[in-house]
Image (tube, helix red, strand yellow):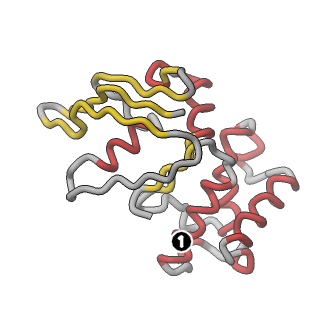
Amino acid sequence: MLKIENLTKQFGNATAVDDVSLSFNQGEMIGIIGRSGAGKSTLLRLINRLVSPTQGQILFDGKDICQLKGRALLHWRTQCAMIFQQFNLVDRLNVITNVLVGRLGYHNTLPTLIKHFPAEEKARAILALARLEMDQLALQRADTLSGGQQQRVAIAKALVQEPKILLADEP
C-alpha cells in the first residue's frame, strides 16, 4: 500500500531523513521511535507531502506521490490525514468548526470561508466527536480545552477526513 524508497530530505547542509526505505501494508499500525531530532516528524511531513523530498520516492498503491501537484496533491492530503504534534487547532473557533476543517479538501472554498458546511458534514463531525466522548463540547472554543481535550479534537479532525492513511506525530 505505502512504499518508501531511498527517501532523503536535506535542509541546507543538514540531512533530516537519510536514505530511508520502508513499506507498510493496509491495516498495519506502525510506530517510529527515535531520539529527538532523528527526523521522525520530517518523515511524516514527507509522507503527507507538507515538505518535498530531496531524493527518493513515496509510492501509494503504486503511484509516486512525490510527483503530485495542485489538485492531485490536495486530494492526496485528504487521503493521508495528519494529527500534528501541536494539534493545529484554531483557538478562536469552536470544537465542531475545528473538526470540520478536516473536510475542507472536499469542498469549494467560498462556502467554507464563512463556516458554511452541509448538515451531513456537521453530523459526521458530531459522530467523530462522540466517538471520542467530546460531543458535549462541540460549541466550546478550542482555547478553553485542556491539552487532552485538544488532542481528541485533533484526532476527530483527522478521522472526519476518512483517510486511507492516518499519521500521528507524538499522539
> Count the marks: how many?
1
Q: Position of residue 146 (x, y in %)?
A: 51, 81
Local secondary structure at mark 1: helix
Quarter occupied by residue 125: bottom right
In the image, farthest residue toward the left: 13
Q: Is residue 134 above or below residue 1?
A: below
Query: Which image quadrant is residue 122 in?
Result: bottom right
Relative to 63, does residue 164 appear above or below in the rendering? below
| Residue ID at (55%, 79%) | 145
Taking 76 as reference, is 138 above or below it? below
- Are there few (<14), some (14-19), or many (20+) residues within 10 Å of tag 1? many
Q: Amino acid at mark 1?
A: Gln
Q: Position of residue 147 (x, y in %)?
A: 47, 76
Question: Within the image, what quadrant is residue 97 found in?
Answer: bottom right
Specify whether 116 is left or right of 104.
right
Tell me residue 77's x, y (percent): 56, 37
Front one among 10 and 93: 10
Q: Which residue is mark 1?
A: 150
Quadrant for the C terminus, please. bottom left
At 68% from the left and 76% from the top, the residue drawn is: 134
Rendered location of residue 108, percent (x, y): 74, 36
Tell me which residue sits at (20%, 58%) in the image: 35
Could you tell me which quadrant the N terminus lies in?
Answer: top right
Which of the pair 135/22 is nearer the observer? 22
